[in-house]
């Protein structure tokens, strides 16, 4: 083969390769992309990570109803219904009373908040933080409770101060605060 023929053959192969690569893009024109927009559904919060909120309800009327009946007496059908309605009324009245919490402090370091809550829970306190889980750089409240007895929380303050160095303040509990 001559040098001139080789040059023409290489040039032809080069032009065919360019045509195979670029001609389909030129002939197709602009392509439109259809992208679906969707909103991500957040994961459900971990409910098992928190202990249940416990409220102590005295059962004075229930114990009075049980103490008044002797084992020899057989209660009539209206007596248990009356006792049941009295228990429901006392529970309703008890829940209408305000509940209280001890707010230990407000912190920005989320790791310290998580450590403090775990330490309090390990000692048997019903400790929580808001927001749950703590957010770094934002204000995170740490509190103990709730409890319907303000006096009981005031008595726990000394042990909390010995344990954490924070005396905290007893405040009314609003379950819907944000």
Image (cartoon, grey):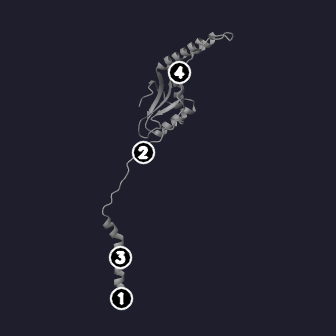
Q: Residues within 10 Å of mark 4 (few under 14, many from 20)?
A: few
CA–CA distance in space, label 3 to label 4? 90 Å
- Looking at the image, can residue 64 be seen? no
Where in the figure is residue 156, as x and y percent of width and height?
Answer: 53, 24
Please state which of the two labelled residues, at mark 3 or mark 1, is closer to the viewer: 3
Q: Residues within 10 Å of mark 2 (few under 14, many from 20)?
A: few
Please state which of the two labelled residues, at mark 1 or mark 4, is closer to the viewer: 1
Q: Provide the residue designation for mark 1.
A: 3
Where in the figure is residue 107, as x and y percent of width and height?
Answer: 44, 35
SS state under label 2: loop
Residue 157 in the image: above or below residue 89: below
Q: Are marks 3 and 2 in contact (CB under 8 Å)?
A: no
- Looking at the image, can residue 96 be seen? yes
Q: Provide the residue designation for mark 4.
A: 152
- In terms of sequence position, does the residue under pointer 3 or pointer 1 come before the other? 1
CA–CA distance in space, label 3 to label 1? 20 Å
CA–CA distance in space, label 2 to label 1? 65 Å
Residue 30 position by quadrant: bottom left
Residue 49 in the image: above or below residue 30: above
Q: Residues within 10 Å of mark 3 (few under 14, many from 20)?
A: few
CA–CA distance in space, label 2 to label 4? 44 Å
Residue at image location 49% in from the left, 17% down from the top: 93
Where in the figure is residue 27, as x and y percent of width and height?
Answer: 31, 67
Please state which of the two labelled residues, at mark 3 or mark 2, is closer to the viewer: 3
Q: Is residue 157 left or right of residue 5?
A: right
Q: Quadrant of the N terminus?
A: bottom left
SS state under label 4: helix
Residue 7 position by quadrant: bottom left
């Amino acid at each position: 083969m001559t040098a001139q023929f080789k040059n023409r053959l290489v040039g032809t192969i080069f032009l065919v390769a360019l045509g195979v690569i670029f001609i389909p893009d030129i002939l197709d024109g602009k392509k439109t992309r259809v992208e679906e927009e969707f909103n991500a559904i957040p994961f459900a919060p971990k409910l098992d990570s928190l202990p249940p909120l416990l409220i102590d309800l005295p059962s004075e009327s229930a114990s009075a109803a049980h103490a008044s009946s002797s084992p020899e007496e057989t209660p009539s059908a209206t007596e248990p219904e009356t006792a049941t309605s009295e228990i429901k009324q006392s529970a309703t009245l008890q829940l209408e009373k305000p509940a209280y919490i001890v707010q230990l402090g407000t912190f920005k370091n989320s790791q310290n908040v998580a450590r403090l809550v775990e330490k309090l829970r390990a000692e048997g306190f019903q400790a929580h933080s808001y927001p749950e889980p703590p957010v770094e750089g934002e204000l995170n409240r740490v509190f103990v409770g709730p409890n319907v007895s303000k006096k009981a929380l005031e008595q726990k303050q000394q042990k909390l101060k010995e344990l954490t160095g924070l005396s905290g303040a007893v405040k009314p509990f609003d379950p819907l605060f944000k």
